[in-house]
Image: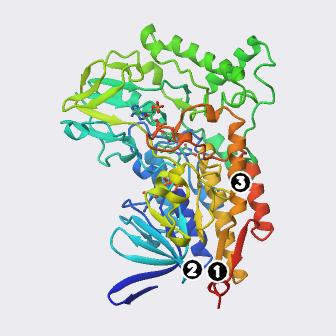
């Protein structure tokens, strides 16, 4: 509903959703079906989120496609066929577009519109939202579906503005593509994005120079076309597969090994690791034993095995040495690749260690480290994202008393949520895959569907109970945040500088913001909270709150 008063155009909604990626689209479908007046606002000019923005060469998922899709609609599962084990970005984006059309979602999405500010009005108990096009929206519920990895990070290198060539960030890739033919290209960053892009760029560029700060463990993806017989079997058994995904630790229907890496002989361990290397995949190594992310000694067994593989693949011993990682395996996201280490055997590829000789500045002609200047026609920043809190802090979100989320969380240093879904002082605000939920340490499709379903059930419950306001109780978030930290501190995750820790952004506070207890146990906790009438939250009618 839109009303105009004194020339101000305000749209009135039951629920406003920010973002049209996997989360926002399903959220829209779910609550619109339940009869709520809902609208999505999206900065891009189309649907897709991650898969709209990240169009760099080689981009694909690292969770098998058969698990990396929506599971809420049997019809949709039957209609869509993934061509390969790990679908490429264009195929995933086509899938998202297909979903948007199938469920007629576009009519309730406003594209090219950024949510800039969202302020909770304590008089009306509604969110007043300002959009980048100057329009205003008043909504009862404010739902962020902004993603954990949607705020691209180009480090503040001195001199970038003087660079004469072209430069790109993997997460803001041009739609028309980039022609590397005959070019001297520099790639800065060797995380998942860099490792996917480097082998593809190397095949096209005249010369590729990789600027590596932290060497990475990466294992072969062994991507392949999906066998129709296998897909038939998956379809026939999907109810069972879905149940296992939901009950699992990371949203993929397999369980970690039951033994410690240290309780078997070196020979047995190497046999297991050799099989994992041949099989490939995200969990092949981390799930081989039960203590690889808990015990430094156990972790070292897998780390040294992968280092040995790198030495075997990379022919030049000096380059191989530079590529050897030394942090705890899997405490940065494990990476699966197609010919990554092999790429360093190409004559047109060179590797620069920028931990040893850091980048000083970007010059008009290229990249200057403390050692020398490298002349380049193009620079690709594969430098990642201001993750988790980044996309939330890009909006000015203000709760009770005008306090901003950024202030409340002390710029991330004191992030506090209850279940990663809500935070005290911000009534009727839900964060899909928010900080302190399993989010990025799971198959995100499982976590997204679980959050969307929990939030829509909650909003339905509120309507049934004639309640208008739901707000996290402060003690609940204190306990939840403490529990998140304790679980993380018992692992090796917090012993490594990673984007999970906020360590990739200079000015960002360090802190682990992911619930590591597993998606299965997490779902049970959330279900229990709902069953007990949303225990840990306070629910009120708007009249109660207004004191009428
Ligand atoms: P996003 O897809 O990030 O969508 C958020 C949307 O919100 C964006 O379109 C953004 O433009 C919009 N937005 C943000 N702020 C505003 C604002 N203020 N106003 C308006 N719009 C706004 N996860 C996996 O589980 N498996 C994988 O294999 C996998 N592969 C990945 C590969 C890449 C290259 C990247 C970057 C991430 C990958 N992820 C993967 C994580 C991925 O982000 C999630 O799986 C999923 O796509 C997130 O969906 P989302 O809708 O929650 O967020
Ligand atoms: O980003 P990253 P990403 N100078 O932060 C380096 C998902 N994803 O886009 O490690 C020099 O991992 C930085 O070095 P260091 C997935 O969840 C999935 O690759 O900080 N270097 C690092 O090497 C993933 O984890 C897929 O020392 C600098 C790199 O840039 C997440 O998105 C594909 C630097 C950034 O790596 C992010 O991945 C892609 C500087 N100033 C993404 N600043 C799949 O395969 C940063 N770096 C599914």
Question: Which residue position holds label 2?
Answer: 125
Q: Mark 2 to mark 3: distance in Å?
A: 26 Å
Whether residue 75 is situated above or below residue 136 in the rendered picture:
above
Q: Are marks 1 and 2 in contact (CB under 8 Å)?
A: yes
Specify how the rendered protein is coloured: rainbow
Please report whichever mark, 3 or 1, sits nearer to the chain's N-terminal start: 1
Number of the front mark, 1 or 2? 2
Q: Residues within 10 Å of mark 2 (few under 14, many from 20)?
A: many
In the image, what residue occupies the spot 44% across and 77% down? 137
Q: Residues within 10 Å of mark 1 (few under 14, many from 20)?
A: many
Whether residue 209 is situated above or below residue 97 in the rendered picture:
above
Question: Which residue position holds label 3?
Answer: 480
The numbered mark at residue 539 is none
In the image, what residue occupies the spot 75% across and 22% down? 261
Q: Residues within 10 Å of mark 3 (few under 14, many from 20)?
A: some
- Report whether residue 237 is seen: no
Q: Quadrant of the C terminus?
A: bottom right
Question: Which residue position holds label 1?
Answer: 468
Front-most of residues 522 and 183: 522
Is 259 left or right of 288, judged from the image as shown?
Answer: right
Is 390 left or right of 302, judged from the image as shown?
Answer: left
> Percent x, y for residue 382?
40, 36
Is 200 left or right of 402, judged from the image as shown?
Answer: left
Secondary structure state at the residue bearing disc 3: helix
Please report whichever mark, 2 or 3, sits nearer to the chain's N-terminal start: 2
> Percent x, y for residue 339?
47, 24
Q: Are marks 3 and 1 in contact (CB under 8 Å)?
A: no
């Amino acid at each position: 509903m839109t009303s105009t008063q004194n020339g101000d155009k305000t749209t009135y909604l039951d629920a406003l959703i920010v973002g049209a990626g996997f989360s926002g689209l399903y959220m829209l479908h779910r609550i619109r079906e339940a009869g709520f007046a809902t609208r999505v606002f999206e900065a891009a000019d189309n649907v897709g989120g991650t898969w709209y923005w990240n169009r760099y060469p080689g981009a694909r998922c690292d969770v098998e496609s058969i698990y990396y899709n929506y599971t809420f609609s049997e019809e949709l599962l039957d209609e869509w066929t993934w061509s390969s084990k790990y679908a490429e970005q264009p195929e995933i984006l086509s899938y998202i577009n297909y979903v948007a059309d199938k469920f007629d979602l576009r009519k309730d999405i406003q594209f090219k519109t950024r949510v800039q500010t969202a302020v909770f009005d304590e008089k009306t108990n509604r969110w007043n939202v300002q959009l980048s096009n100057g329009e205003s929206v008043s909504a009862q519920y404010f739902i962020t579906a902004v993603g954990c990895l949607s705020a691209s990070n180009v480090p503040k290198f001195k001199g970038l503005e003087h660079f004469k060539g072209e430069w790109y960030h993997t997460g803001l890739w041009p739609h028309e593509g980039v022609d590397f033919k005959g070019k001297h290209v520099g790639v800065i960053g060797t995380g998942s994005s860099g490792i996917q892009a480097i082998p593809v760029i190397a095949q096209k560029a005249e010369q590729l120079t990789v600027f590596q700060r932290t060497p990475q463990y990466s294992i072969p993806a062994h991507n392949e076309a999906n066998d129709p017989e296998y897909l038939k079997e998956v379809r026939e058994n999907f109810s069972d597969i879905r149940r296992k995904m939901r009950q699992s630790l990371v949203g993929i229907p397999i369980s970690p090994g039951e033994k410690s890496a240290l309780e078997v002989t070196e020979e047995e361990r190497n046999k297991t690791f050799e099989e994992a290397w041949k099989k490939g995949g995200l969990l092949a190594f981390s799930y081989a034993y039960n203590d690889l992310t808990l015990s430094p000694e156990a972790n070292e067994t897998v780390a040294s095995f992968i280092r040995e593989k790198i030495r075997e693949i990379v022919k030049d011993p000096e380059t191989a040495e530079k590529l050897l990682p030394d942090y705890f395996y899997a405490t940065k996201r494990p990476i699966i690749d197609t010919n990554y280490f092999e790429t360093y055997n190409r004559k047109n590829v060179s590797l620069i260690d920028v931990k040893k000789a850091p980048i000083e500045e970007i010059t008009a002609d290229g990249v200057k480290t403390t050692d020398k200047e490298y002349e380049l026609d193009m620079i690709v920043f594969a430098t990642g994202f201001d993750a988790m809190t980044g996309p939330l802090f890009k909006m000015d979100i203000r709760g009770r008393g005008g306090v901003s989320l950024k202030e409340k969380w002390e710029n991330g240093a004191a992030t506090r949520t209850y279940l990663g879904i809500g935070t005290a002082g911000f009534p009727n605000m839900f964060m899909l895959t928010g900080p302190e939920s399993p989010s990025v340490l799971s198959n995100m499709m499982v976590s997204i569907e679980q959050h969307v379903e929990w939030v829509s059930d909650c909003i339905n419950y509120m309507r049934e109970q004639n309640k208008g306001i739901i707000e996290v109780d402060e003690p609940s978030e204190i306990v939840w945040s403490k529990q998140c930290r304790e679980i993380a501190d018992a692992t090796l995750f917090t012993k490594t500088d990673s984007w999970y820790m906020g360590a990739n952004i200079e000015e960002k506070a360090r802190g682990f913001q992911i619930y590591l207890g597993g998606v299965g146990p997490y779902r049970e906790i959330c279900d229990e909270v709902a069953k007990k009438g949303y225990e840990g939250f306070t629910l009120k009618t708007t009249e109660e709150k207004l004191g009428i």
